[in-house]
Image (cartoon, rainbow, N blue to C red):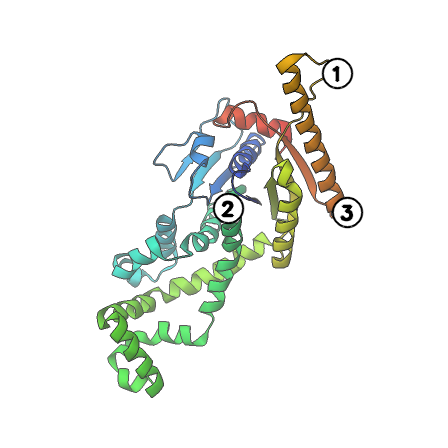
């Protein structure tokens, strides 16, 4: 099994490169899925997925030796699957029908990042050979790596476990359960939010705690896989003008977290030289401008190589297409020109 994670700033082409990588891997006989965590859902355009499809097998012509799938991260469906797979049988329906559950799934901050790691775990268990992840913008890409471990650490706190596991007993004997200080705090929260809401929150947590603790364990395992260079490689995506600054930033951030960077993809490179002959007039001016930009890009890539030095990171120049990327044909061209597999 192999996991490839693409990350970078906005508008640099992460989705196109992720989709092209998954396509190349399917052509080589691997059952592959590309998952986007970007709410813009550009993957639908790149792979030609149905407008309402959260996960869909991509029809290829000619057919690939293996399967290619595309998937959009959906917080609610991923969380529902986790509840059904890991909840206690007697409590599954209660959790799914609880009034707090819909709020958590639809509007709680950070759920998208938490569920990205959960979805990767679910895909691994379904037996995909390769998983390619197209992350959201840079800040959210790093949160996708940070928040699961923060949640796992929170779930380890003794008071969180105590409340989650004993609330139903405590609710029947509140005065005997709460100390004076904790009872006063509980009373203030109840006065602010209302007794019914506080009761619903604590009741829900008592039902959800086994799922939350299970999530924490799975998150640790998945993050460990993401840190394992034998399983996962991170690829930074940038454009020539931003390659040095973007790469320096992501190398520092990922290095501090212990995630392995394998390659830097410099996207939209102008690779074709204008040639020695020059026309006169406007045509000649345009050719001179094109050649100046192309040489500037070459200098930036050389500077990137010097910056990386002996860091052992691959630099993958990806030529810019003359048309907008959309559909399998353009992805085939990207994969062939850059050898992204």
Check disc 2 and report its element: helix, strand or loop. Answer: loop
Which structural element holds mark 1? loop
Residue 77: percent from left, percent from top? 35, 48
Residue 310 disc label: 3
Query: In screen coordinates, is 50 left or right of 121?
Result: left
Q: Looking at the rendering, which quadrant does residue 296 occupy?
A: top right
Whole-number angstrom distance, CA of label 1 to CA of label 2: 41 Å
Residue positioned 63% across, 27% down in the render: 337
- Which residue, given by chain and number where applicable, does mark 1 sit on? 276
Q: Position of residue 82 (x, y in %)?
A: 39, 55
Question: For residue 4, what is the image quadrant?
Answer: top right
Residue drawn at point x = 35 percent, y = 33 percent: 51
Q: Of circles 1 and 2, which is in front?
A: 1
N-terminal of the pair, mark 1 or mark 2, is 2
Q: In this figure, which residue is indicated by the disc labeled 2? A: 137
Quadrant of image for the C terminus: top right
Q: Position of residue 125 (x, y in %)?
A: 47, 49
Q: Is residue 1 visible?
A: no
Local crowd at mark 3 within 10 Å, few (<14), some, or many (≥20)? few
């Amino acid at each position: 099994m192999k996991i490839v994670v693409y990350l970078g700033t906005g508008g640099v082409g992460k989705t196109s490169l992720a989709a092209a990588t998954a396509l190349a891997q399917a052509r080589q006989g691997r059952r592959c899925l590309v998952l986007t965590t970007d709410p813009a859902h550009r993957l639908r355009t790149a792979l030609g997925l149905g407008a309402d499809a959260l996960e869909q097998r991509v029809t290829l012509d000619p057919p690939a030796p293996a399967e290619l799938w595309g998937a959009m991260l959906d917080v609610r469906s991923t969380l529902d699957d986790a509840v059904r797979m890991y909840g206690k049988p007697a409590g599954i329906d209660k959790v799914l029908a609880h009034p707090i559950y819909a709020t958590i799934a639809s509007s709680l901050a950070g759920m998208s990042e938490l569920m990205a790691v959960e979805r990767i775990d679910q895909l691994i268990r379904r037996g995909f050979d390769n998983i390619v992840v197209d992350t959201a913008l840079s800040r959210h890409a790093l949160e996708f790596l940070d928040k699961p471990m923060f949640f796992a650490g929170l779930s380890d706190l003794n008071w969180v476990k105590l409340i989650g596991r004993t609330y139903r007993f405590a609710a029947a004997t509140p005065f005997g359960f709460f100390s004076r200080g904790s009872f006063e705090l509980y009373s203030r929260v109840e006065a602010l939010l209302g007794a019914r809401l506080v009761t619903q929150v604590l009741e829900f947590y008592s039902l959800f705690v086994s799922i939350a603790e299970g999530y924490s364990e799975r998150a640790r395992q998945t993050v460990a896989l993401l840190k394992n260079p034998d399983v996962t490689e991170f690829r930074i995506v940038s454009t020539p003008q931003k390659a040095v600054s973007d790469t320096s930033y992501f190398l520092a951030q990922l290095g501090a977290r212990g995630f392995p960077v394998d390659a830097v993809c410099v996207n939209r490179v102008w690779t074709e030289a204008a040639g020695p002959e020059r026309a006169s007039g406007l045509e000649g001016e345009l050719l001179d401008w094109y050649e100046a930009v192309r040489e500037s890009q070459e200098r930036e890539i050389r500077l990137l190589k010097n910056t990386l030095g002996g860091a052992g990171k691959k630099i993958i120049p990806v030529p810019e297409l003359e048309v907008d990327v959309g559909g399998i044909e353009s992805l085939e061209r990207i994969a062939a020109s850059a050898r992204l597999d």
